[in-house]
């Protein structure tokens, strides 16, 4: 009887201890998923068409003869009201005495404003008129899209253009619509596209001629790395099958499967499985995407009288709709709404640990901006996330003790600046990334901001982390391009956490460094690095030196 009682107590204690273990596994998988998502975002094309050179527009000529005092400038013609903003560049001409040279300067400035805004086929003219009234009337001739079509032979085999091209026949032609269309076509990695503006039969009309080709509709990717946990399998391998534009709507579909790679000492003792499905389709300035994933891990634990299998599962489902709200030649702003549901369950052998069951859902509103400043690129996302009662949300186990909630409110920031430069004959690049989270609520472990590991603060092995309600980290990387496809890089990272649960930690900040090489060998993309902690709390457990690798092959 005493043995049975001791076994029950031991099992319960193990369940409590393994709750922390489960948290580490889920946090690690969340960081891994985010890294893969960020990598996919980086591969999305950014199309910026060369700006056409408008007419020269210098200063207004002085002492023109003859000239006429101008008290007002008006714009007339088809869609003139839509372009009234172009008059702002000629506002300083009001009150001046203008002759033919001055009027040409007004026209040149307005034409440049139109071209700068992407209206490259729209013209502004000055018809003969009586200027003794003090009123200068300009005529707008909008350039319109007559038709959108594919060039032969792609017109028979190409994808649908209606969900890729925002412009429709009859719309005023704008380069921004063409840039968006090219991004929608080129988001399929195996496709290449170009769009020519061809003059139409009538003045002001143009045809958009799409040149499109695709190498193949199916891709296979194989990967291997050592980003796993010692407890469930250090070495991880995966395969991804991607279907590009299979239905002809410029859609992306991929299915990935990942698992721990067998090792001599770990066979049957631990393991992980992860499956993910992605589908996304553009619609002009809109993008719709659906993601689903399932993760499972297990570990054999020695009990007092027998071994136990401690395991856990988690599932995520999300739907996201994003829209480009603004774009010009140097910047792009996107708003998005994401609905999500996630759940997790933990088991000892085949018996679920009921007090660790979680199911929650909510929404996230985000605003993203990307800015091109010369060779530098600045991009960032600000997100507001809130848990809701829908999607079958269950109260979090911590709510019984007022120590967390399944309906959190979070604000997240993710910003990156990239600056390529030359040092002598060497091509260099500096990149800095700032991530942060803020919340005034007590959060469950999966919602806390965690640092320590290759995806957050490098130099740490990731077996332990610091996490709390609020936090920020700064990742800095200086890279040197060697040859055509190789980079040596040096990383220096720092992170800090704060909030009610930070008081229970060994400390609240980490700093680490890394030295690595990225390159390609025999078609395999390779990333190898070594790192070490530079500053940590005294009792924070981590290896004195750490290293890692990742391999990726795509066919």
Image (tube, helix red, strand yellow):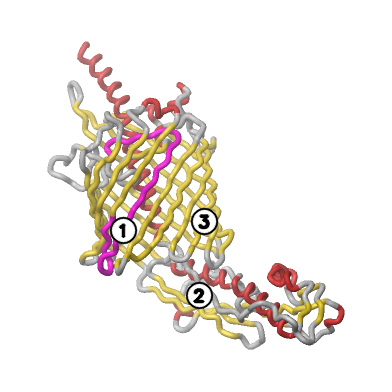
Q: CA distance from mark 3 to mark 2?
A: 21 Å
Q: Is residue 231 magenta?
A: no
For disc 2, the neighbor class at 10 Å (few under 14, some 14 to 19, many from 20) is few
Residue 305 vertical placement versus 61 (above, below): above
Labelled pair 2, 1 in contact (Cβ < 8 Å): no
**Residue ID for mark 2:** 50
Left or right? Give the position of 441 relative to 426.
Answer: right
Mark sitting earlier along the chain (2/1)? 2
Which residue is at 53% across, 62% downward?
A: 331
The disc at residue 479 is 1
Dot 2 falls on a residue whose secondary structure is: loop
Range of the magenta residues? 462-489
Mark sitting earlier along the chain (3/2)? 2
Q: CA distance from mark 2 to mark 1?
A: 28 Å
The disc at residue 369 is 3
Residue 535 vertical placement versus 190 (above, below): above
Please count the marks in the image: 3
Report the mark closest to the observer, 2 or 1: 1
**Furthest-bottom residue in this view:** 201
Q: Which quadrant is the N terminus positioned in?
A: top left
443 or 301: which is nearer to us?
A: 443
For disc 1, the neighbor class at 10 Å (few under 14, some 14 to 19, many from 20) is many
**Furthest-top residue in this view:** 2
Which residue is at 32% across, 30% downward?
A: 20
Dot 1 falls on a residue whose secondary structure is: strand
449 or 98: which is nearer to us?
A: 98
Q: CA distance from mark 1 to mark 3?
A: 24 Å
Residue 266 vertical placement versus 432 (above, below): above
Labelled pair 1, 3 in contact (Cβ < 8 Å): no
Q: Is residue 485 magenta?
A: yes
Residue 255, image x and y in percent?
36, 55
Left or right? Give the position of 520 relative to 293.
Answer: left
């Amino acid at each position: 009887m005493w043995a049975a009682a001791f076994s029950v107590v031991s099992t319960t204690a193990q369940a409590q201890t393994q709750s922390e273990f489960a948290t580490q596994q889920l946090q690690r998988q969340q960081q891994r998923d985010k890294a893969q998502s960020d990598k996919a975002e980086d591969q999305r094309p950014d199309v910026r068409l060369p700006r056409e050179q408008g007419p020269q527009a210098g200063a207004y000529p002085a002492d023109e003869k003859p000239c006429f005092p101008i008290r007002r400038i008006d714009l007339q013609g088809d869609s003139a009201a839509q372009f009234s903003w172009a008059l702002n560049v000629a506002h300083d001409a009001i009150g001046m005495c203008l002759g033919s040279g001055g009027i040409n300067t007004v026209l040149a400035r307005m034409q440049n404003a139109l071209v700068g805004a992407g209206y490259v086929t729209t013209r502004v003219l000055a018809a003969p008129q009586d200027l003794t009234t003090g009123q200068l009337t300009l005529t707008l001739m909008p350039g319109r899209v007559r038709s959108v079509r594919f060039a032969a032979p792609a017109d028979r085999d190409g994808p649908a253009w209606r969900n890729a091209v925002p412009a429709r026949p009859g719309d005023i032609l704008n380069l921004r619509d063409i840039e968006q269309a090219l991004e929608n076509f080129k988001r399929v990695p195996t496709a290449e596209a170009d769009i020519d503006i061809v003059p139409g039969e009538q003045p002001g009309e143009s045809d958009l001629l799409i040149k499109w080709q695709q190498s193949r509709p199916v891709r296979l990717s194989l990967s291997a790395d050592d980003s796993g946990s010692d407890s469930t399998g250090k070495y991880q391998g995966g395969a991804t099958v991607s279907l590009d534009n299979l239905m002809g709507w410029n859609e992306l579909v991929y299915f990935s499967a990942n698992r721990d790679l067998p090792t001599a000492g770990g066979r049957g003792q631990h393991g992980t499985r992860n499956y993910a499905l992605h589908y996304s389709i553009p619609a002009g300035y809109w993008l719709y995407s659906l993601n689903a994933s399932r993760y499972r891990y297990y570990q054999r634990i020695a009990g007092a009288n027998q071994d136990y299998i401690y395991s856990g599962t988690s599932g995520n489902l999300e739907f996201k709709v994003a829209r480009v709200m603004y774009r010009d030649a140097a910047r792009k702003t996107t708003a998005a709404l994401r609905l999500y549901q996630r759940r997790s369950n933990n088991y000892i052998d085949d018996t679920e640990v009921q007090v660790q069951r979680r199911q929650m859902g909510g929404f996230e509103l985000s605003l993203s901006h990307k800015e091109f400043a010369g060779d530098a690129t600045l991009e960032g996302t600000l997100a507001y996330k809130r848990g809701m009662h829908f999607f079958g949300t269950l109260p979090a186990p911590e709510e019984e003790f007022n120590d967390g909630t399944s309906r959190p409110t979070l604000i997240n920031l993710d910003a990156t600046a990239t600056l390529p430069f030359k040092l002598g004959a060497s091509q260099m690049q500096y990149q800095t990334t700032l991530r942060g989270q803020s919340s005034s609520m007590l959060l469950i472990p999966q919602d806390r901001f965690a640092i320590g590991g290759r995806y957050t603060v490098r130099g740490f092995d990731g077996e332990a982390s610091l996490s709390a309600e609020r936090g920020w980290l700064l990742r800095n990387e200086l890279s040197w391009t060697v040859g055509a496809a190789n980079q040596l890089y040096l990383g220096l990272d720092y992170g800090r956490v704060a909030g009610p649960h930070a008081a229970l930690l060994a400390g609240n900040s980490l700093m680490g460094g890394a030295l690595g090489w990225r390159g390609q060998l025999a078609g395999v993309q390779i990333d190898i690095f070594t790192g070490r902690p530079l500053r940590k709390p005294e009792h924070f457990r981590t290896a004195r030196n750490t290293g890692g690798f990742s391999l990726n092959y795509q066919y």
